[in-house]
Structure formats: structure tokens, C-alpha cells
């Protein structure tokens, strides 16, 4: 049995610092905006105020601390602090969640403002003025509207170069499709992802994926935006492997798309105890590092936070790096995700885009642990992934660079071809989610062992020229234990 959602709910969201409203001028006809019949609205002239009333309303608004944004014979658009609006109404401002149809046909709760109090009308967002002698007769609060724009397609465009699609191609290549047929989809498992943001791309809604509202770590940034497109695109890899998991995204980027709050995001994500915590970012230092140097002092706090997350039984995954030598992937207990390229004939080889090395800072640690699907240098343009329309990745991937042509998508269609170990990390995170869904008590070490012991061995190719290790039989520094296979990992764990 299903129950319809209530149209309106109390909202936990605070009243914004700046509120936009509309002051209706008291009409010459004596009709009022609140009490008139809807048929009266067709007589627009009956709602005109006098020029004196308009001037008096402007003085009243400005005297209350409001800025007049626009005016007409019918009313004034005003903006200012909630207290200024309440001064002229005598009410109390509250927030409510209202179920409405938004972009791309979605139906969801959207925060609306309301003024309540004695004598105020029952209609949401409308208030009478406190003084009957005021030159305006009502205040109408702005209601959120849905832009009727063309949104990106939930289906990737046809492109004229070799590539893999999410979710089906990735799921098949990683043995996840077989796990799904067996009923293992990561249901009930939360995967946190710290990245550039999470745009509400129709791809996620069309597949009914569960994405929690993003959380912004950089003050003043919009959690609904992903200016770079990286987090949005790479998160699709999680659902390709674990379609039943819940994604908890943390936006750690500023408005330029730069990851300036990654550590804050990691600490916040850890604090909220996800099952899996995936990170497609890395520092970079000289390789080989000075002997007996240890991680830079500036990275030690992050190392401790990562170790603490693992001690809290969180499966922590970091991208091994796209030729980077970073601290994060080397921390003991981290699953470092490297890269394997699956060519047009589905032959496997190490990706020349990916890092691989023995740690000089933590004895016995090798990077990567296991590998996901990654393209080849110079651009690793392998996976068709959803991004924010017109974002940095959408534009860059569509253009020619580094001796390679563009990816055959357009610079504002909301799709781009890219990968890197940034794609491998969420693929591995999806695998970890499936394992945690099957065996909730599995420790991070047990998850890592199951992935390693079930991986498909890769014996061809070399990793990034910076490290230049060859893939060999068994574990190696090019691909770790090899390409993950989710179905086989289920049998192991």
C-alpha cells in the first residue's frame, strides 16, 4: 500500500538573510488583493493605486529598511531582512516545505516562506499589513519557480569514438551485473563522496538512484551546483556498480570549481559515519621523496583523520593518482584505486594514465591496491559521464587538447568523456558497498582482501611513465591485484 505525500510540511531550514516580497498598492476601487474574488483580477484597472499611494508606499518600505527593486501602479517589489517585512505586517515569518513539480519533471519538496500570526490569511506566503491606513494592503512573499529550460538528456549522446557507458557497460566489465542478478545491489549502504559537487542531472532521477541533498563545505557556495562537473560525473560510477546504495555528496569546491575544502569535507563525512567514504582527489609531491622524510607536516592531520576513519570501521577509498605521488593513497588501510584499460576487443592492460609505486613513507604499502576502468593517456577519455551542462569538464572535454580531438559531445549538453583514477575510486566504492550490503559487519580490511583475492589479473601494459611499472602475473605496481570483479568478491567475502 502506498500513501500520498503531504502537500506541505514544516521545514527545518532557517529564514534566509534576505527576503524578496511584493507590496500590493491599496487599489482606488476599494478591492483588496487578499479578499477579492478571482474573477475581479480580470479588471486590472480596478487594482491600480494613485501616484501618491505609490510614492507613500515607497517611503514606507524604505523607512522600514527595505530596498525597492521595482515598482508599478499595482505594487512594489522589495528586498531586505525578514525583520523589516515583519515590521509592516506584525506577523512571524516561518519556512515550510511544499511539494511541487520542478525541473525535468521532478516532484520534490521546495522551501517556501510564510507569514503567520493573528489576523493573517490562511494562504501561504500572503500577509495583511499591520496598519489599515498603510498605502499598501498586502505583502506577497516570492515563491520559488521552476525554470522551464532544456535540461540535459538522461541518456548519453551518440559519439563517434570508442567509449563505455554507465551504468551497463561498467557494470558488465566489473562483474557487477552478475551480482545484481543475484540480488546484491548495495541496498542500505551509504557511500559518502567528497568532490566538486553534485548536480541534479536527469540521469540519476531516470535510474531512480538515491542521492541525498549535497552539503557545501565552502561558505557561500551553492550545494546544488557543481561548477567543475567532476563530482557529478564520477559519482555515476558508484551507481553503475551499486545501484541500490545511497550517495551522500559533499561539495568541497569554490565557485571556480577548485577543491579548496577537501579536508573539511573528509572530516565532515567521517563525522557522519558512512559505510564507505570515497575520494577522487590527491596531493602531489616529488618522487622519489627525500630519504627518511615522511609525509609533509602539512599532510599529517589528514593522515590522522584517514586512519581514524578506518579505525571507525569506514571503508576508505582514494584514487591512486593520475601520475600523482600523493599522501592519501599511501595511508595504511586505504584502498587505493588504480586503472586498467579495457580496449575495443575487451582486452585488458594497465592504463598509462595511472600511478603505481611502493610507498617510501609507509613501509609495506603499495599503490594501487586494486584497479577500476580507466582510459589511456593523454586524456583518459573512456567513460560517457553526466555533468552539469556547460561546466568546465563539459567544455574542456568537447574541445581538442593534448594532441587529441574533442570527445564528440557538445560543450553544453551535460555529458562528457573522461575517467582517470577519479573514476576507478567510485567504482571500487560501489564494489565495497555491494560487499557491505551482503555482509554489513565486514571490516575495511576484509573488504580490501575480498577485492584483492577476486580481482582479474592483468599482465599487459605499463602504468604512468612517471613510475613506468609493467603489469605482470600476480600483484604488481601497475594495476595492484588487477581489475575488480564484484561477483567474485561476493564469493570471497
Image (cartoon, rainbow, N blue to C red):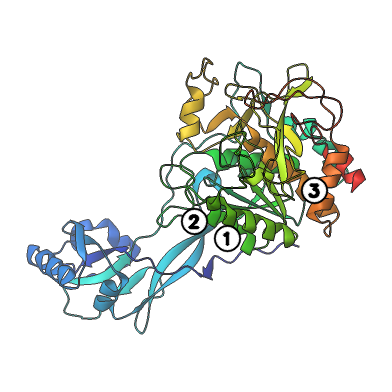
Within the image, what quadrant is residue 422 found in?
top right
The residue mark sitting in front, 3 or 2, is 2
Residues at circles 2 and 1 in contact by the CB criterion of under 8 Å: yes
Q: Residues within 10 Å of mark 1 (few under 14, many from 20)?
A: some
Residue 49, position in %: x, y?
Answer: 14, 64
Q: CA distance from mark 3 to mark 2?
A: 28 Å
The residue that appears at 80% across and 36% down in the rendered structure is 484
Read off the residue under disc 2: 217
Query: Residue 430 appears in which quarter of the rendering?
Result: top right
Q: Is residue 457 left or right of residue 139?
A: right
Where 362 falls versus 462 (above or below)? below
Q: Between residues 224 and 48, which one lies in front from this camera angle? A: 224
Residues at badges 3 and 1 in contact (C-beta under 8 Å)? no
Q: Nearer the viewer, residue 241 or 114?
A: 241
Q: Earlier in the sequence, mark 3 or mark 2?
A: 2
Task: Give me the disc on residue 268.
Answer: 1
Q: CA distance from mark 2 to mark 1?
A: 9 Å
In the rendered view, would you say 68 is above or below 242?
below
Identify which residue is drawn at 59% across, 54% down. Answer: 300
According to the picture, the residue beneath numbered tag 3 turns out to be: 434
159 lies left or right of 172 = left
In x, y percent, where is residue 110?
49, 59
**Residue 97 visible (yes or no):** yes
Nearer to the camera, 90 or 197: 197
In this view of the protein, can residue 129 be seen by the observer? no
| Rendered image quadrant of residue 267 | bottom right
The reply to whether callout 3 and callout 2 are in contact (CB within 8 Å) is no
Q: CA distance from mark 3 to mark 1?
A: 23 Å
- Furthest residue to the bottom? 118
Amino acid at each position: 500500500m502506498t500513501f500520498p505525500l503531504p502537500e506541505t510540511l514544516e521545514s527545518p531550514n532557517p529564514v534566509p538573510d534576505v527576503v524578496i516580497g511584493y507590496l500590493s498598492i491599496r487599489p482606488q476601487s476599494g478591492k483588496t488583493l487578499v479578499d477579492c474574488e478571482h474573477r475581479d483580477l480580470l479588471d486590472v484597472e480596478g487594482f491600480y493605486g494613485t501616484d501618491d499611494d505609490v510614492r507613500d508606499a515607497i517611503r514606507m518600505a524604505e523607512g522600514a529598511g527595505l530596498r525597492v527593486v521595482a515598482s508599478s501602479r499595482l505594487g512594489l517589489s522589495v528586498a531586505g531582512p525578514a525583520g523589516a517585512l515583519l515590521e509592516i505586517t506584525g506577523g512571524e515569518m516561518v519556512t515550510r516545505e511544499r511539494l511541487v513539480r520542478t525541473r525535468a519533471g521532478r516532484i520534490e519538496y521546495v522551501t517556501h516562506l510564510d507569514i503567520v500570526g493573528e489576523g493573517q490569511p490562511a494562504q501561504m506566503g500572503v500577509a495583511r499589513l499591520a496598519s489599515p491606513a498603510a498605502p499598501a494592503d498586502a505583502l506577497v512573499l516570492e515563491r520559488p519557480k521552476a525554470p522551464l529550460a532544456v535540461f540535459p538528456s538522461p541518456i548519453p549522446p551518440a559519439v563517434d569514438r570508442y567509449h563505455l557507458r554507465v551504468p551497463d557497460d561498467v557494470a558488465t566489465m566489473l562483474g557487477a551485473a552478475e551480482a545484481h542478478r543475484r540480488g546484491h545491489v548495495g541496498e542500505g549502504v551509504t557511500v559518502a563522496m567528497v568532490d566538486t559537487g553534485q548536480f541534479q542531472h536527469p540521469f540519476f532521477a531516470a535510474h531512480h538512484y538515491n542521492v541525498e541533498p549535497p552539503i557545501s563545505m565552502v561558505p557561500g557556495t551553492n550545494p546544488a551546483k557543481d561548477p567543475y562537473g567532476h563530482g557529478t560525473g564520477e559519482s555515476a560510477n558508484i551507481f553503475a556498480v551499486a545501484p541500490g546504495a545511497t550517495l551522500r555528496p559533499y561539495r568541497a569546491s569554490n565557485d571556480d570549481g577548485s577543491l579548496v575544502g577537501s579536508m573539511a569535507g573528509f572530516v565532515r563525512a567521517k563525522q557522519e559515519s558512512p559505510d564507505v567514504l570515497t575520494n577522487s582527489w590527491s596531493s602531489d609531491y616529488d618522487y622519489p621523496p627525500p630519504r627518511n622524510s615522511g609525509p609533509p607536516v602539512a599532510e599529517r592531520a589528514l593522515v590522522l583523520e584517514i586512519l581514524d576513519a578506518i579505525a571507525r570501521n569506514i571503508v576508505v577509498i582514494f584514487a591512486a593518482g593520475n601520475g600523482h605521488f600523493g599522501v592519501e593513497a599511501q595511508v595504511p588501510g586505504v584502498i587505493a584505486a588504480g586503472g586498467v584499460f579495457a580496449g575495443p576487443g575487451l582486452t585488458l592492460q594497465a592504463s598509462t594514465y595511472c600511478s603505481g609505486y611502493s610507498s617510501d613513507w609507509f613501509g609495506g604499502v603499495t599503490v594501487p591496491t586494486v584497479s577500476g576502468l580507466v582510459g589511456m593517456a593523454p586524456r583518459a577519455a573512456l567513460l560517457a559521464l553526466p555533468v552539469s551542462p556547460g561546466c568546465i569538464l563539459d567544455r574542456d572535454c568537447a574541445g581538442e587538447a593534448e594532441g587529441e580531438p574533442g570527445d564528440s559531445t557538445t560543450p553544453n549538453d551535460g555529458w562528457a568523456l573522461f575517467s582517470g583514477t577519479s573514476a576507478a575510486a567510485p567504482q571500487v566504492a560501489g564494489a565495497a558497498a555491494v560487499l557491505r550490503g551482503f555482509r554489513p559487519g565486514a571490516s575495511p580490511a576484509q573488504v580490501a582482501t575480498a577485492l584483492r583475492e577476486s580481482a582479474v589479473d592483468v599482465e599487459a601494459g605499463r602504468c604512468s611513465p612517471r613510475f613506468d611499472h609493467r603489469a605482470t602475473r600476480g600483484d604488481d605496481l601497475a594495476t595492484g591485484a588487477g581489475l575488480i570483479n564484484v561477483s567474485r568478491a561476493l564469493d570471497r567475502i
